[in-house]
Amino acid sequence: MSKASDVFVTGGTGYIGRPLVLELLSRGHAVRALVRPGSENRLPAGAVPVAGDALRNETFARSIAPAKTFIQLVGVSHPSPAKATEFRSVDLASVRASAEAAAQSGVEHFVYLSVAQPAPAIMKAYAAVRAEGEAIVRATGMNATFLRPWYVLGPGHRWPYLLVPAYWIFERLPGTREGARRIGLVTLPQTVAALVSAVENPPEGVRIVEVPEIRGHAGRDERAK
């Protein structure tokens, strides 16, 4: 494992954030996580809570240092076409606040949970906001990793397993292979492992991690099978 580091996380109490924080702590990293006031007890033991508002960088910017890695996970839960307005008011506003705060605090590596690009037309608004978020991070000049999953399978997020047979077919047909792989399904352990790998192997410049590469990461639960 690479040298343990100080990591600042937004969205650390969420579906992906909580298991990620647990894994980072288990690997010796020091983790502080932005939480809403009153939600501190939802963080895994060992993480240091930072009470603040993810949409207002002045509420947490001074608490980022000495972290040199910043992980941005904030976003609307269970994205759907009906949440286009929320994508801009929450997802986009939070990444803008985080990128500005991280850059001002001397963060060296910004890890952003984005989404597969391009995405199906039905989720055009969601993909557009995430692409805009990537552009905001790029504009800061920080080294960055953009993780681009499509759908992350896990507890409470299992219905797409019904689509696995169709994906199997589409990934083997020349005309649909590329698209099916780009918006393929990944698991929660794979996603967490890919995020941990990003933290422990920071890039110089911008690195994009797409579905096939995320699938190449086996999390602790999968390794145990």
Image (cartoon, helix red, strand yellow):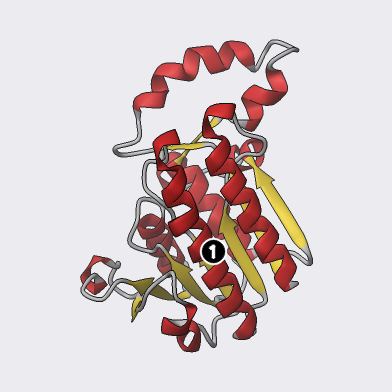
Query: Where the C terminus falls, by quadrant?
Result: top left
Query: Can residue 175 be seen in the rendering of this structure?
Result: yes
Query: Can residue 144 be seen from the camera position used here?
Result: no
| Residue 103 location, quadrant | bottom right
Could you tell me residue 218's position as x and y percent? 52, 43
Eyeballing the image, is 102 above or below 156? Answer: below
Residue annotated with mark 1 = 95
**Residue that appears at 66% across and 56% down:** 134
Residue 206 location, quadrant: bottom right
The one nearer the camera, 69 or 52, is: 52
Instruction: Name the amino acid type tagged 1.
Output: Val
How far from the left and from the top, in percent, is residue 102?
Answer: 58, 77
**Residue nearest the viewer, comparing 203 with 13:** 13
Residue closest to the eye, 78 or 2? 78
Residue 155 position within the rendered picture, expressed as x and y whole percent measured from the top left:
31, 39
Could you tell me which secondary element the residue under label 1 belongs to? helix
Left or right of residue 210, residue 64 in this image: left
Q: Residues within 10 Å of mark 1 (few under 14, many from 20)?
A: many
114 in relation to 41, above or below:
above
Above-or-below relation of 87 to 23: above
- Residue extending farthest to the front is 85
Q: Is residue 12 left or right of residue 73?
A: left
